[in-house]
Amino acid sequence: MIFSSTRGEAADLYTVIYNNISYHSGYDADRCNWIAQAIFYCSQQYDVDPILIASVMETESSYHFDSYSPAGAIGLMQLMPDTASSVGVNPYNPLENVMGGTIYLKTQLNNFSSWGEYGVTYAVAAYNAGSGAVYQYGGVPPYRETQNYVVKVNQAYMNILNQL
């Protein structure tokens, strides 16, 4: 599976992402606007595609601030405490959580940028399973959770892309 970076001009990217946040989260306009602004801020600060950030966030937490996983992941982009600590953010602070998730995603994109046309896919798999697992298996690890995760992020990405 390949994540495309081709974008059309049919709709405003901010509006599409905002509407996607509203649809999935059910939040009011102020919260949806805050999340969209955080996505675009982090995209610009860390040079990561805003559609990819939004797609990971949708898959991780459905854009919810107060999302917690049984494994202990926290917030919008579901940072594990150790991951948050390693990138120097407080996962309970919403902006820092999005920044930390974006930094971690950027790290994975850098780790797998030389892996050819599936580099972004492997980076997304590493966001879920860790880079060690991707290195160990030479690609998306054979974990059902990670394989489903990559598919869900790709579907979210294509859904946003198709609205442009």
Image (cartoon, grey):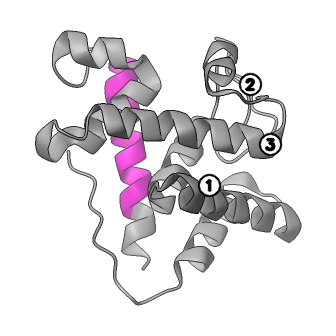
Point 52% across, 77% down: residue: 13
Q: Contact (CB < 8 A) between labels 2 and 3?
A: no
Please tell me which residue lies in front, 53 or 17.
Answer: 53
Q: Residue at x 42, y 80 (%)?
A: 164
Residue 37 is drawn in which quadrant? bottom right
Q: Residues within 10 Å of mark 3 (few under 14, many from 20)?
A: many
Q: Where is mark 1, residue-wise?
A: 42
> What whole-number distance in Å separates the C-alpha atoms at marks 3 and 1?
12 Å
Residue type marked 1 = Cys
Q: Residue at the location (18% across, 41% down)? A: 118
Q: Main secondary structure of the magenta part?
A: helix
Disc 1, SS: helix
Q: Is residue 113 left or right of residue 110?
A: left
Quarter holding residue 137: top left
Q: Could you say where residue 133 lies in the image, as x and y percent from the top left?
A: 31, 12
Hey, what amino acid is under mark 2?
Answer: Tyr
| Callout 3 amino acid | Pro
Which residue is label 3 attached to? Answer: 94
Q: Does 61 sit above or below residue 50? A: above
Which span of residues is magenta-colored?
144-158
> Which of the two discs, 3 and 1, sits closer to the camera?
1
Circle 2 residue: 68
Q: Could you tell which of marks 2 and 1 lies nearer the N-terminus?
A: 1
Q: Tell me if residue 114 comes above or below residue 84 in the rendering.
A: below
Viewer can see residue 64: yes
For residue 81, which quarter of the picture?
top right
